[in-house]
Every structure is written in C-alpha cells, then in structure tokens.
Amino acid sequence: MITKASKCQPEILEETAAIIRRNEDYSTANFAHCKTQMEVAKELKSSDSWCVLIDTRPTALFRLETFDSEARISEICLNSDTSLEKILSDIRQDLAKMRIAQVAVRTSSGDAQMLAAVGFEMDDSYVRFSRVPTESKMMPILPLLNATQKEVPILSRMMCDAYKKTDPTIGDSQSAERMLRSIMFGSQGRYLAEASFSSGAFPNLVSACLLTANSAAEARIAQLFTHPLYRARGLATTAIAIGMNRLASSGVVRLVGWSRENNDVLRRLLTKMGFNADRKLVEMVARI
C-alpha cells in the first residue's frame, strides 16, 4: 500500500529511515544533511513528496508526483530483500486503484533494461543539477510578482507558447493550466509561493520560475519558462537567483533542477549559475 511518509506511524518511519541509512549512496544523494537515523525520519515526516510502500513493513521509499491520469516515480530506495520488479508491480496495482493510466519511472540505465523486459519503454533521459542556495544582490530586470493561482490563466497561455516547439505534452493552454495548478496545489511537493516569481507588469507576464519543496532542506525548480520573444534577457537567471535569496534565509540547503539531456539551453543556464550535474537517469514509461 502506498502511503505518504508524512502520514506514516513513527515505527514505520524509523524502519524506512533505517533502510535509507543502510544504502550509503542513496543516503548521500538524498539525505546528506541528515546525520542520524532520527534526523532522516524527521525529514520524511515533514515532507509531502516522499511515499512509502508498505507490505506489513516498509519495502520501499520513493517520490510520487501525479498529474491528471499520469504518475511519475523517482528516487526509489528498496529494502534489501525486495526486487525493483516486485516493488513496481505492487506500486502499479495501487496506482490502478487511484485511476492512474500511465506511470513513468526515473531510474538508472541498468535498471532500465530490467523494466524494458516487463513492459516499460524508454521515454527520455534526464540530468539532475543541484547547488547550495546562496544570497546575491541581483536586481530584477522587469518587475517581479510572487506567482499565485490568480496568475495561472495568464501563465498557462505563456507556458504553452514557451513549450510549443519543444514539449508536445503541453498541447494547449488548458493542459498547461492543469499542470500549473497541480504544482500550486502541492501535487509535486509543497509549493513555495514566497520563492516563486513571474516577471513583467501584470497582466503582461513574460517569464516564470516556480519552486516546490521536496523536504524541509531541499527545494526543486518545478517549472521554468519564458515567452519566446523575451528569451536571452536574463529573466530566468534573475528569477532563480532571487528565489535562492528566499531559500537561503529559510534553511534550505539544496536546490535541484531536472533537465532533459538534450536541452542544451537549460543545461547551460544551470551550469552558468553554479549548478553541478550530479545524476543522470532514464525515464521509462508503461501503461497501468
């Protein structure tokens, strides 16, 4: 049974934290700021993005994001006596009960081969970038507004224009609007309205950077887009930098961003801002 970590009983969280601590590479990649098992359990309890698969006892930890009838699973950590194939079979059964029609799993290239053998197909490859948020004195190029649900209709039309040639999944402004609302309603982690910005003078918004909290110590760039007519002016750089100012004063120790491997523009932007590429994963997709 899939259960949000924040809703788990203390003994389940303690066992899950023990699973994480036994996996040194996973613990370093995702909980480097936690020095003890108790700190890991506390971190899980404070986050809405972590889920635990429970079969009497915890068998796996992972991040789960849902949008419409699709789900994305990432950062899977397995109990030592379980297999990824068995875990994904159990997860797919639970997702079916949630009326999820398709699931995407971000995993290593080695595990991707196993998933291909059980009906998954490769969709794309992604690179994770991360850095410690630090404060800067960068000044806004255009007026900045904290991005809220009030701006969603405007942002969705702009997002559709921004992705028209690069991402066919955002085919119209209604799809973009549903995606933005899923971020702001917390389907991808707690929405950080105070660190998320849109650029321009309302209602003429031309760029946006939306951040979510993976945990109390880690934030993520959930969406970053600029209208094609306003690109290459430093708007995205400014929004990220000022967002990091807010994160640095709130105790967040890491900001992460995901980029398609072939998205050279985003990769150059993040690298220029001091982000380091620390993980490469393959996204495998299957119907439920």
Image: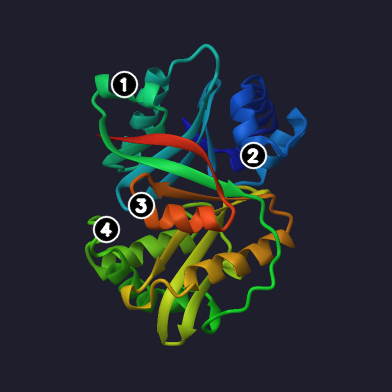
Name the residue type under label 1: Gln
Identify the secondary structure beneath mark 3: loop
**Residue 138 versus residue 11 in the image, above or below:** below
Packing grade of label 2 (10 A; few <14, some 14-19, many >=20) is many
In the rendered structure, are the residues bearing label 2 and label 4 in contact, judged by CB atoms less than 8 Å apart?
Answer: no
* Separation (CA) of disc 3 from disc 4: 9 Å
- Name the mark nearer the viewer: 2 or 4: 4
Q: Is residue 166 left or right of residue 80?
A: left
Name the residue type under label 2: Leu
Ranked by sequence position, the earlier of labels 1 and 3 is 1
Packing grade of label 4 (10 A; few <14, some 14-19, many >=20) is few
Q: Quadrant of residue 33?
A: top right
* Separation (CA) of disc 3 from disc 2: 32 Å
Name the residue type under label 4: Thr
Q: Which residue is mark 4?
A: 166
* Residue nearest the observer in this picture, 59 or 277: 277
Residue under the point 39% across and 58% down: 265
- Name the mark nearer the viewer: 3 or 4: 3
Ranked by sequence position, the earlier of labels 3 and 4 is 4
* Residue 221 appears in the picture as rendered: no
Q: Which residue is mark 1?
A: 113
Q: Which residue is mark 3?
A: 263
Q: Position of residue 92 (x, y in %)?
A: 34, 31
Q: Quadrant of residue 162?
A: bottom left
Q: Is residue 197 left or right of residue 231?
A: right
Ranked by sequence position, the earlier of labels 1 and 4 is 1
**Residue 245 versus residue 40 in the image, above or below:** below
In the rendered structure, are the residues bearing label 1 and label 3 in contact, judged by CB atoms less than 8 Å apart?
Answer: no
Name the residue type under label 3: Asn
- Name the mark nearer the viewer: 2 or 1: 1
Ranked by sequence position, the earlier of labels 3 and 2 is 2
In the rendered structure, are the residues bearing label 3 and label 4 in contact, judged by CB atoms less than 8 Å apart?
Answer: yes
